[in-house]
Structure formats: C-alpha cells, structure tokens
C-alpha cells in the first residue's frame, strides 16, 4: 500500500495533531466498534510519524469512562459500556505507533456528564494519575498552536465535537477525511458532520 502523503503545508509551526479516540473499543473487535475503524490506521500512523519527525505537538484524546457512566445503556444512555478507565478497551489501539513525546487527554471521566469533545479532556500524567492537568485548549495555547489537524473516531461524535469546539475556541481546523470513520446511527451522519465542520470554516483535507 502507498504511504499517504502528509502535505508540507500541514507540517509548519503552529500546527498540532489531535488524534481522537483511536481506542480498542472503537475498533473492530471492541465493544463499540466503528465499522471500518481500522481502515484509518495507515493514515493516522503516517501523520504521527511526520509530526514526530518535525517536532510538532501531538495529542491523543481518550474516552475514559467510569463503569457507571451516564452514556451507558444501564443508565439510559445510547451506548454499551465502552472505554472503561483502566480497561484494555480504553487503550490506544496497539496498531497505532505512539511517538514517545505524545500527550494524552482523558474525557468523560465524570459519571454524570457526557463528554464527546477532546476539549473537555484533561492532560493525563501517569506520574500523577489523580491530578488532571490542563485542558486541551490551554495545552495547545502553551505551545503556540493556532491550527489543529483532527482525525480519529468517530466522525459523527467525538471527531465532530472536537473539530467544532476547536473552531469555537478560535483554532483553525484541518480535518483529514481519510483519517476518520463514523458510526452512522442515522445514515449520512458522518458526511453531515464533515459538512458542518466545513461550513463553520474548517478545511477538509
Ligand atoms: C464516542 C460514542 C460514545 C466517540 C464516545 O469517541 O466518538 N462515541 N463515546
Ligand atoms: Zn464514550
């Protein structure tokens, strides 16, 4: 397979890569698998490698729920249990090449609050697991980031919410179409999500 090309224009100062929820539970075999979720691995890995080589910031978001999370069916939510904190399903999928300098933002940790956007996440520091760090926006601003490149799972939920929040917060957004897949509970949800991001000023690569 050809390596996807990462354009030089997206490898310049002020850019950061935000990889949304590429976790075992959202990939084939997981408890809330996105159809074809694994089809993005090659694209995600190519961008990770390029960002690593250029010394640009890399953030992973992780859905990271308590067992009694409000979005789970047992509590009247939409979803089967998924991405339970500390479980294998919450891990970044092992086929993803995680650069050593990458940072991780956990979201959905409050049992009573849903959180689709990565901007609701807080930096996870394994040395201080009980002390959440800065939110994603603060972390990006500390690094002089003005443009976020967004990819991951699922297009119509967490990717959508993350990209729209980024735009609301004043970041430019580049959404990588080949790097996202959606759930499409209602047919067309993913395409509509991409259209929404574009209509709000996001660039679709
Ligand atoms: C997500 C459904 C439930 C996502 C998270 O990451 O898109 N979807 N929780
Ligand atoms: Zn969730």
Image (spheres, helix red, strand yellow):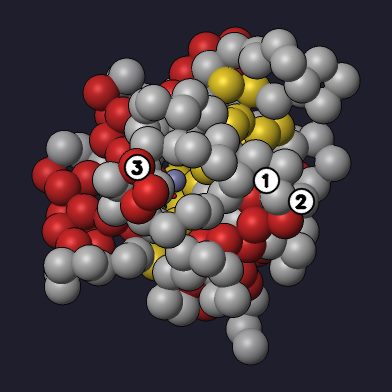
Q: Which of marks 3 and 1 is nearer the N terminus?
A: 1
Query: Is 80 displayed left or right of 45 in the figure?
Result: left
The residue positioned 46% from the left and 78% from the top of the image is 36
Q: Can residue 196 be spotted in the picture?
A: yes
Q: CB of mark 2 within 8 Å of CB of mark 1?
A: no
Per the image, the residue denoted by label 3 is 75
Is 55 drawn above or below residue 131 in the view shown? below
- Label 2: element kind: loop
Q: Nearer the viewer, mark 3 or mark 1?
A: 3
Give the total of numbered labels: 3
- Label 3: element kind: helix
| Image spot of residue 40 (x, y percent) | 53, 70
Q: Residue 98 carries which label?
A: 2
| Image spot of residue 49 (x, y percent) | 73, 55
The residue positioned 60% from the left and 45% from the top of the image is 84
Q: Nearer the viewer, mark 2 or mark 1?
A: 2
| Image spot of residue 125 (x, y percent) | 77, 22
Is 77 drawn above or below residue 59 in the view shown? below
Q: Can residue 6 be spotted in the picture?
A: no
Q: CB of mark 2 within 8 Å of CB of mark 3?
A: no
- Label 1: element kind: helix
| Image spot of residue 197 (x, y percent) | 22, 45
Q: Gap between marks 2 and 3, in whole Å?
A: 34 Å
Residue 184, picture quadrant: bottom left
Query: Is 176 displayed left or right of 122 in the figure?
Result: left
């Amino acid at each position: 397979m050809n390596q996807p090309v990462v354009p030089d224009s997206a490898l310049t100062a002020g850019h950061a890569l935000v990889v949304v929820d590429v976790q075992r539970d959202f990939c084939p075999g997981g408890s809330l698998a996105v159809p074809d979720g694994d089809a993005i691995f090659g694209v995600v890995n190519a961008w990770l490698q390029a960002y690593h080589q250029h010394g640009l910031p890399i953030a992973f978001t992780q859905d990271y729920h308590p067992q009694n999370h409000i979005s789970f069916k047992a509590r009247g939510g939409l979803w089967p249990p998924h991405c339970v904190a500390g479980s294998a399903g919450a891990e970044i999928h092992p086929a993803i090449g995680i650069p050593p300098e990458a940072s991780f933002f956990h979201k959905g940790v409050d049992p009573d609050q849903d959180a689709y956007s990565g901007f609701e996440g807080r930096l996870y520091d394994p040395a201080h697991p009980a002390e959440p760090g800065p939110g994603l926006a603060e972390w990006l601003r500390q690094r002089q980031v003005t443009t976020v490149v967004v990819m991951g799972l699922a297009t119509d939920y967490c990717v959508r919410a993350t990209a729209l929040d980024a735009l609301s917060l004043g970041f430019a957004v580049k959404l990588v179409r080949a790097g996202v897949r959606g759930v499409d509970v209602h047919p067309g949800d993913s395409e509509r999500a991409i259209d929404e991001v574009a209509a709000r000023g996001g660039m679709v690569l």
